[in-house]
Amino acid sequence: MAAAGGRDGGREAGSAPGGPLCACATRVPRTLRTRDSRPRLTAHARRAAPPTAHARLAPPPTAHARRAAPSPTAHVRADIRGPLEPHCAGAARAPERACARAAGRSSRHKVLPAPRMASRNRIGVYIFTASSGGLPPTEITFAKLLRERGYATALIGKWHLGLNCHNRTDFCHHPQRHGFEHFFGTPTTNVRDCRPGAGTVFGAAYRWLVLLPLQLLALAALTLALLRRLGLARVPAAAFAPLALLAGAVLLGFLAFRHYFRPLNCFLMRGFRVAQQPTSFRNLTQRLTADATRFIRRHAGAPFLLFVSFIHVHTALFASPDFAHKSRHGAYGDAAEEMDWSVGQVLDVLDELGLANDTLVYFTSDHGAHVEEVSAQGERHGGSNGVYKGGKSNNWEGGIRVPGIVRWPGVLQAGLEIDEPTSNMDVFPTVVKLAGAPLPQDRVIDGRDLMPLLLGERARSEHEFLFHYCNAYLNAVRWRPPNSSSVWKAFFFTPKFSPPGSNGCFGTHVCLCHGRHVSRHDPPLLFDVSRDPGERRPLSPATEPRFHDVLRAVRAAVADHQATLARHVPDQLSLAHLLWKPWLQVCCLDAADAASSSGLGCRCDGGQR
């Protein structure tokens, strides 16, 4: 974790490598500092590696909190991929990621029926905007709690926690149902299929659901034709009609999916209204940045929470004309530099309005580099994790080490680095306490307040154990014993890299969490990541005298942890919730948009191209 008390720290945060970025800014009251007791909070987050257990005070994640009259808060998140200081995000396919996206939902219900935002299926994220799963209104986010304290709240960028439940206008999962007064961005995510010419994430599905059926139908037709020609069987001409109809249906379905996926799933919303469909990537970052700075200016005299969840640098990579083809590091470098510019714009406005000393800015990412993201030309589009093993979607260090950077001039010492295990889950209690709001008492709060660490009031993190999930499955446990420099990490299973010997799951594009895609370990695979951060040398009783003692402590911690989990909870990522439902599909609906919309195509410019 790194702390940047001055402005330069915030700049650096934007330039670090990694995945999607998120920035959050919050302005808090004067009790904390000079004018209002509520600091403003700003958070920037990048999406890349799964949340890990270490946090750093410096660039990447930035959070500004302000103490004076109602202070503004800004949170920025980005999709940046790259090796960083040990701040835990959680595997890209793990529960921690859903928590990070939930704008600070860092809690679990012991008695109440909390939703499960981690999948037991192969698909662990929402692909369609017309899926029925998402973050239920009963969940408590820091945006809800801060709004109750008088904060103006905004989410700009990516949401990806669902949209509707029962019809296209209920918006039960929408960010404005979760405490955000203002929303401008995409309700889902950015995938290659959203940008023409950027490729597709459905290659494997096309092979299994389109190419294979067409090949089987062609083989059946060829077999019947040979039998008929050789006189081995009486095959009427009508027998070929069903095969032709089936082949036509498969091909028509494929073409329809390719034609409609982008407009139906890649669009921008302003509040509850579709602003642009499909999304135009031209100057998209500039539009999002302008909206963020306008929000700060509107609420400069009151406390605010600004959560900027960058679409950069998730593929499909994009950059405006001012940044395209300028970086030595190709398309990824262009996107990272544009994101860096955007973070700088937010910090410039805070400085211009005299809010910097009263605003806590936090910058982070939700996972490490997506090492499997390589273009057809061989260009690396997913970033790099350096010496760390693995990446997005798994719990090797490359997947969970992410930036944890904090900026609060006048309160936090500039350039401070804290090598203690922290987590993105810690943002929730940190922001809530800074705003003077009480934490919920009806659920387990997994995060810990970061301020004692940042202010030097504590020397060690309150996280003795951190539990790393792969989707709904407990994958690994990290243990930092008291009065010890060791950081033990025990894996109950690990992904099978493909091809063997590689550093990722290139066959499936992301590593999966169960079945034939993992190797199970009994006893668990044990590492001391303080001595072996690359996780190259698993320990054994012969090489580590404390081997059995460590595993006993880990198993006891797992038992205690699992005792706090509710057993039967609604599964928001079940197949039934993931499927596309036409009655939930959102389109351009007002009169002006209807004129430029093309039926199910749902196309409207929104005047923002």
Image (spheres, rainbow, N blue to C red):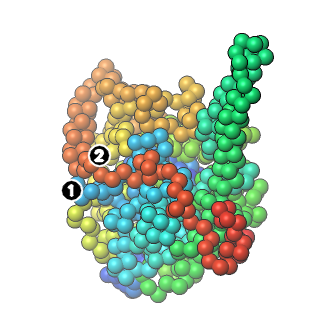
Regarding mark 1 in the picture, which secondary structure is present there?
Answer: loop
| Total numbered badges shown on the rendered structure | 2
In the figure, 5 relative to 100: above or below?
below
The image position of residue 171, as x and y in percent, is: 46, 68
The image position of residue 557, as x and y in percent, is: 23, 42
According to the picture, the residue beneath numbered tag 1 turns out to be 111
The image position of residue 601, as x and y in percent, is: 67, 62
Q: Earlier in the sequence, mark 2 or mark 1?
A: 1
Viewer-side label of 2, 1: 1
- Image quadrant holding the C terminus, namely bottom right
Q: Residues within 10 Å of mark 2 (few under 14, many from 20)?
A: many
Q: 123 or 387, which lies in front?
A: 123
Q: Is residue 481 left or right of residue 593?
A: left
Q: CA distance from mark 2 to mark 1?
A: 22 Å
In the figure, 66 relative to 546: above or below?
below
Instruction: Give, as a three-letter code, the residue at label 1.
Output: Val
Q: 35 or 520, which lies in front?
A: 520
- Image quadrant holding the N terminus, namely bottom left
Tell me which residue sits at (42%, 71%) in the image.
177
According to the picture, the residue beneath numbered tag 2 turns out to be 465
Tell me which residue sits at (29%, 46%) in the image.
465
In the figure, 180 relative to 334: above or below?
below
Q: 135 or 387, which lies in front?
A: 135
- Which disc, if any, is residue 31? none
Residue 419 visible in the displayed image:
no
Q: Is residue 567 left or right of residue 74?
A: left
The image position of residue 85, as x and y in percent, is: 47, 49
Tell me which residue sits at (39%, 32%) in the image.
493
